[in-house]
Image (cartoon, rainbow, N blue to C red):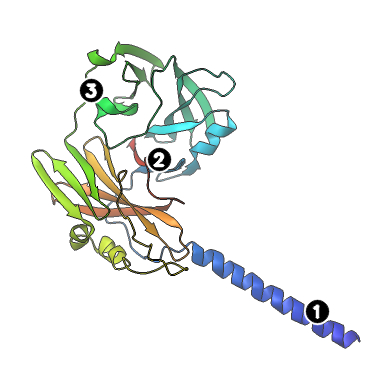
Amino acid sequence: MNSIKRVGFAVVLLLAILVSIAAVYFIAASRQTNIDVHSETEHSPAVCVYGKLYTDNHQVDVGAICRRNGFSLYEVLYVENENAYIVCSANASTQSNSWTIAHIDLSSSTFTPKYHFEDVQSPYIINSSKPYSERNGFYCGDGILVLSDLSNVHSYNVATNTATVQPYHDYSFPSRLVSGRFVSENGIEIRYNEKQQIFSLEDIAENSDAVSEIATLRNSTIWDGKTLKLSNFFNECSVKTVGDMLYAMGSFYNYWGESYAVLLVYDPALNCFHYIDHYLSGDWVSNECYVVCTTS
């Protein structure tokens, strides 16, 4: 009888080991993007993907930090070394109609409210493809963060912790050297100076080994047989501009159907795109996936 028990125990133990191995394999496989490509740029910009901020030195869930402090993240506007400056909702306990500029120490995750824009006349919308005059928030340079509700413009100085307020129509918004727009799930249009050109994914792949590798998976399927890996690679939220830099984000799915944001940067000197990196997004690229202005 004891020998039977020992055999039974051995069988159960073996099954447990096999299940554990299978689980580890499944988890590991689910995190594979099925692409093995390397960055084609020397520097990776700071990127925010659904509230998670990626920098050279940190991966910080900024959205979670805001929630722990009673706020809701709208947008990360600016990163300088270990310091992130964001715009978020008013503290939930105040129930006021205002936007808050806050500072987050990326090393300690310390959250510090800095400035409140009271009596806001519009909802906050992230739209890093629009001209600055149509954005609710952006970094203006020289340590100045700008908030606009299309009625008033608040210019907040990071160094002095002070702000000036001007009527919207009196404020001089910065211009852009480069802009772009979504054309189709396979293409985007770039406007640089007076040049206007449409780039398809195939056009981009001609000058990017990394994108060429990604493009080979266009017709491959995910676990349930659906062809989703490059379905709708571009969408209305794919084009992003930061200063005079233009970025494009596309959506990619691994075998298990998990989505990644693929980041590309436009090179006006060579008139082509370079691959930067990809980030686990959990959903299609949206306005909540964007490049953040940084200074070292």
Characterize the local packing of mark 2: few (<14), some (14-19) or many (20 or more) Cα atoms within 10 angstroms. many
Residue 281 falls left or right of residue 176: right
SS assignment at label 2 = loop
Among all residues in the image, which is located at the extreme left? 194
Give the Cα separation between the discs numbered 3 and 1: 73 Å
Q: Position of residue 255 (x, y in %)?
A: 44, 66
Q: CA distance from mark 2 to mark 1?
A: 51 Å
* In contact (CB < 8 Å): disc 2 and disc 1: no
Q: Residues within 10 Å of mark 3 (few under 14, many from 20)?
A: some
In the image, taking residue 69 as reference, residue 261 lies left or right, namely: left
Relative height, residue 43 to residue 2 (above, below): above
Query: Gap in Å between the C-alphas at discs 2 and 3?
Result: 23 Å
Q: Dots 2 and 3: beta carbons under 8 Å? A: no
- Residue nearest the observer in this picture, 177 or 216: 216
Quarter of the rendering occupied by the N terminus: bottom right
Amino acid identity at mark 1: Phe
Q: Is residue 142 above or below residue 296?
A: above
At horizontal 17% and vertical 45% (from top left) the residue drawn is 190
- State the mark number for residue 179: none
Tell me residue 5's x, y (percent): 86, 82
Give the secondary structure at mark 1.
helix
Badge nearest the viewer, 2 or 1: 2
Identify residue type, mark 2: Glu
Q: Image quadrant for the C terminus? A: top left
Q: Residue at x 25, y 25 (%)?
A: 133
Indicate which disc residue 288 carries.
2
Identify the residue under disc 1. 9
First along the sequence among labels 3 and 1: 1
Numbered-mark total: 3
Using the image, tell me which numbered label, if any, was put on residue 173: 3
**Is residue 225 or residue 137 the one in the foreground?**
225
Residue type indicated by callout 3? Phe
